[in-house]
Image (tube, rainbow, N blue to C red):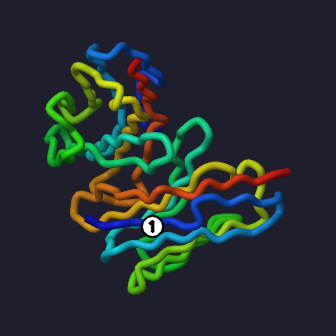
Amino acid sequence: GIQVEQSPPDLILQEGANSTLRCNFSDSVNNLQWFHQNPWGQLINLFYIPSGTKQNGRLSATTVATERYSLLYISSSQTTDSGVYFCAVSGGSNYKLTFGKGTLLTVNP
Amino acid sequence: DTGVSQDPRHKITKRGQNVTFRCDPISEHNRLYWYRQTLGQGPEFLTYFQNEAQLEKSRLLSDRFSAERPKGSFSTLEIQRTEQGDSAMYLCASSIGGTGPGYTFGSGTRLTVV
């Protein structure tokens, strides 16, 4: 199956700083999503981005499918951005997702 | 549209007991997925339904696990003879077909087996 690696595993920032999270995957995909898991366990869908670039407020994401990686950018970070960020991909017709281990982001005031 | 609902939010059970979880997907979503997440890991796929048909099961889903989706609406996940290793967060998600943007997760059921 597809392997997904995320880096860094942990990231600590001061409020207002920018950050880049990376997701590498081992095979071609037809679905790539970034999720934010809040402290209560809820997974929030941030981006559906199997290729190209998208922006939503302070967040943006880029996927270079030919090189099998995706980047999530967080600008002007806020304490509410804290949590675990997951990259998840699928390559089959059933769209079942394979998740990476996540990046634990802590934003300090 | 109230999102994907899961019940209960938390369940503590004694080893050997049976437990059942429920998931109510977004009403117009025909696909429903179950995932399991253990501490420090990303969610792992367990099974999925298209309407009422269960189309794929992970090898993680041992014989003690069974899932149903009668009439293509809500789904239940039952674990028989629970073991301590079953302790995890059980997440349900739904989508329209396989479209990525519509993939919505519920808040999960946290199971603790003591």
**Foreground pick, A12 / A93:** A12
Horizontally, residue A15 falls left or right of residue B14, namely right
Residue type (three-letter) at the residue carrying disc 1:
Glu
Residue at image coords 58%, 51%: A84
User: Whole-percent x and y of residue B9?
Assistant: 47, 24
- Residue sticking out furthest to the right: A109
Residue B1 visible to the viewer: no
User: Whole-percent x and y of residue A70?
Assistant: 50, 74
Q: Which residue is mark 1?
A: A5
Residue at image coords 17%, 37%: B52
Q: Residues within 10 Å of mark 1 (few under 14, many from 20)?
A: some
Residue at image coords 28%, 68%: A91
Vertically, is B71 above or below A9? above
User: Whole-percent x and y of residue A101?
Assistant: 47, 56
Image quarter for residue B15? top left
Image quarter for residue A55? bottom right
Residue at image coords 15%, 47%: B55
Image quarter for residue B64? top left
Residue A90 visible to the viewer: yes
Element class at badge 1: strand
Number of numbered discs visible in the structure rendering: 1
Horizontally, residue B63 falls left or right of residue A13, namely left
Chain of the residue on which disc 1 is drawn = A
Vertically, is A89 above or below B14? below
Vertically, is A95 above or below B105? below
User: Whole-percent x and y of residue A53?
Assistant: 54, 77
Vertically, is B91 above or below A12? above
Q: Quadrant of the N terminus of chain A?
A: bottom left
